[in-house]
Image (cartoon, rainbow, N blue to C red):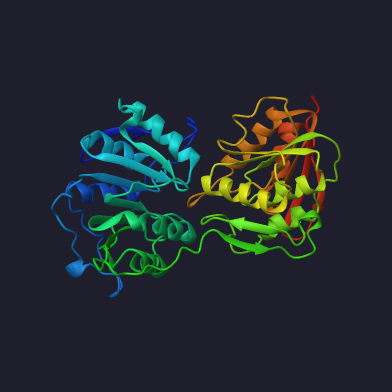
Amino acid sequence: MNRFTTSWGDFQLTRFPEDPREQLRAWDAADEYLLRHLHGDQPQPAQGAEATPAEATPAGATPAAPVELRGTVVVLGDRWGALGTVLAASRPDAELVQIGDSYLAQQATRANLARAGLAPDAVRLLTGTEAPPERIDVLLVRVPKSLALLEDQLHRLAPAVHPGTVVLGTGMVTEIHTSTLQLFERIIGPTRTSLAVKKARLIFCTPDPDPALVRPANPWPLSYALPGDLGPASGRTVVNHGGIFCAERLDIGTRFLLQHLPARRGHEQVVDLGCGNGIVGTAAALANPEAEVTFIDESFAAVASAEATFRANTAPGAPAHFRAGDALAAVPADSVDLVLNNPPFHSHQATTDATAWRMFTGARRALRPGGELWVVGNRHLGYHVKLRRLFGNCQTVAGNPKFVILRAVKRS
């Protein structure tokens, strides 16, 4: 747990799930910069900081007056609830709505609100696939890592933005590119940025007042057909909402796993863990029509993509479950026969194996004796060491110069 000091007070904040050994904070300099700007503080850019001519705020200044947080205030992409918690404590008269794609971020927000002594409904939590408020008076955007996710989110929110809406974005300098600003400009209106402070920037966007403005169509979700060398998935349709990993093409790790899926028959419970667009679990269902597949991801967009992919390729009414959640935490122990997993090794900008380890330990608990965990990952990640430590065994099913597919069996 870490203390977040702001102009509105100090807050004890954590990520979710809470881990006392976790060294990563629940906020960063981009959150700090935005909150200082909203309060009316004016942090000074680092000595020698510059913006490109296309990005620079006039005279390099940010307005000193506090931003009036009134009406409906939407916080988009709040990573661990830091923005929502601080604003809920400081502006109880505004209607605060947090919209995001992360189940874990929602749980972190709930926990941090409770820790601050705030009511659970102090911030209304919506997923990116739910209908947003009909009118947005202040839109605060924590720029995501995925440009496609940002594009989809801005398209969904644009109809609720009006000429008087205050639109502010924030992100680390490594997250804000010319393409980021072009998205704001094309979908919302004229856009500029601040100078950098502690390697963070603000984005200032003015909604276009032209009532006859025709915005470009939202290209998401995006569908494509798979090639013919992927076993049961050959030639099948994949559906991707914005923000899904490798949304415009099949990533090479998943391709390798699809080419080496286990051949199984009979009724069994299968979990596509970290399902993304769901093509792995869909392929398992096509290979074994008696299997009942559960698709789990912490991304709401991923779960929506998985359901769309599954329904596009299976018979009407085919049994399957689709769940946004914290890995296998909600799955009963000793209830699963097969877990298929392509674990991520990034959490936003940080490289970490914490998510993979949580997935592996969850699989160990959820599998029945004799149940199997199949994992595809980059060779250099050394997942075989963790699996042997956890399961007591690990077999290499297939490998190439970049990837390896591992199989671990729960013995008891």
Above or below: residue 324 compared with residue 235: above
Residue 345 position within the rendered picture, expressed as x and y whole percent measured from the top left = 59, 48
Residue 123 position within the rendered picture, expressed as x and y whole percent measured from the top left = 33, 36
Residue 291 position within the rendered picture, expressed as x and y whole percent measured from the top left = 78, 39
Left or right position of 373 against 273: right
The residue at 72%/27% (across/down) is 335
Left or right position of 370 against 237: right
> In this view, which residue lies farthest toward the front?
316
Quadrant in the rendering for residue 367: top right
Count of number-bearing discs: 0
The residue at 68%/27% (across/down) is 365
Quarter containing the N terminus: top left
The residue at 79%/64% (across/down) is 228
Q: Nearer the viewer, residue 258 or 49?
A: 258
Quarter containing the C terminus: top right
The residue at 26%/47% (across/down) is 35
- The answer to whether one can see residue 276 in this image is no
Above or below: residue 275 compared with residue 184: above
- The answer to whether one can see residue 369 in this image is yes
Residue 383 position within the rendered picture, expressed as x and y whole percent measured from the top left = 69, 44
Quadrant in the rendering for residue 4: top left
> In this view, which residue lies farthest toward the bottom?
53
